[in-house]
Amino acid sequence: MKSILVVHYSQSGQLSGIVDAMTRPLSEAGIRVHVETLQPQQAFPFPWPFFRFLDVFPESVRLDPRPNLPLSPAADADFDLVILAWQVWYLSPSQPVTAFLQGADGKRLLAGKPVVSVVACRNMWMTAYDKLVDLVRDAGGRLTDHVAFTDNAHPLATFITTPRWMFTGRRDRFLGLPAAGVTADETAAAARFGHALAAALARDEQDSGAPMLTGLRAVRVNPRLVISERAGQRAFRVWSGFVRLFGKPGQWRRVPALALFAVYLVALIITVVPLSLVLQRTFAPLLRRRLDALRLRYEQPSGSGAARMTEHDRTP
Ligand SMILES: Cc1cc2nc3c(=O)[nH]c(=O)nc-3n(C[C@H](O)[C@H](O)[C@H](O)COP(=O)(O)O)c2cc1C
């Protein structure tokens, strides 16, 4: 009997919904699925009070997370495959996921194992994925596939709907803007990855090193966002260092520096991000080769092709 370990963390339940849809076909195929939910030693709030939301910024960016509680003893079994479901915090893997990958549990469970990465976030996952690739490699895992679920609304709309969701817990339609997050249809359609993994495990493909989820539109990369993200990463490094000069997480001494960062973040979102997108559109012919190379890079390993969609997409 094949067995899969699913490691995940989700505040709103968005990622749990995707994991449920994805793992149901695996259980139905007779595969043992063990789900571990990461638990930070001190829980992160949801919805987020404003300054607590800002306060996790420096340590998220610097991959210096709050530790987790140990996993349950049931996670000690030997698994054929690990599904790691994660979200992005400040262009980085969320702190509970980083803590798992850096800690003893992650190193023990991932060593030598094939790992399928599943991210669900607003839409900026690409440079966080670079960090995740390094963390999985350092933990000894072999990343075979990567699947990304994003909010497909217009990026400018999500700059309003995502913060509203994070600060109030409400993700419904609002002022004519679409609901925040991954849609119910996209969530249900995650089942196609479970069907494909079940078929691949039946053929013992998990150890081949080749991706198992190609042809299922696993990712869609907007290379223009990668350019904005890379600029963001550089600025976030400087800002995170600056805020950390004022104190440790939770200390009031950090509040003024975090307030400055918040002003910077809002200014960035309403000026630099749209401006960079307009400039990139204007100079698109000159940038085409660079953008194509970026798209190709972040589409690895599972790709954006849809050739096997009818084979595995059995959602109504
Ligand atoms: C502190 C924080 C920072 C976030 N930063 C990003 C980000 O940089 N890029 C992005 O696409 N989404 C970002 N998000 C959205 C999350 O990736 C995710 O979609 C959302 O928190 C819902 O995930 P859940 O399954 O944990 O509820 C952020 C969320 C939080 C709480």
Image (cartoon, grey):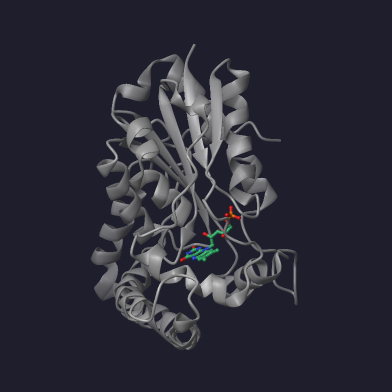
Q: Is residue 247 above or below residue 9?
A: below
Q: Is residue 94 above or below residue 273?
A: above
The total number of labels drawn is 0
Residue at image x 44%, y 25%? 76
Based on the displayed image, in which of its 4 quarters is residue 261 positioned? bottom left
Q: Is residue 132 above or below residue 110?
A: below
- The location of residue 12, given as percent across then percent down, is 65, 55
Residue 156 visible (yes or no): no
The residue nearer to you, when weighing 258 against 112, is 258
- The location of residue 1, given as percent across then percent down, is 49, 11
* Quadrant position of the C terminus in the picture: top right
The residue nearer to you, when weighing 105 against 137, is 105
- The location of residue 287, given as percent across then percent down, is 27, 72
Indicate left or right for 197 with 135 as reference. Answer: right
- The location of residue 231, given as percent across then percent down, is 32, 75
Based on the displayed image, in which of its 4 quarters is residue 172 positioned? bottom right
Residue 205 visible (yes or no): yes
Indicate left or right for 304 with 134 as reference. Answer: right
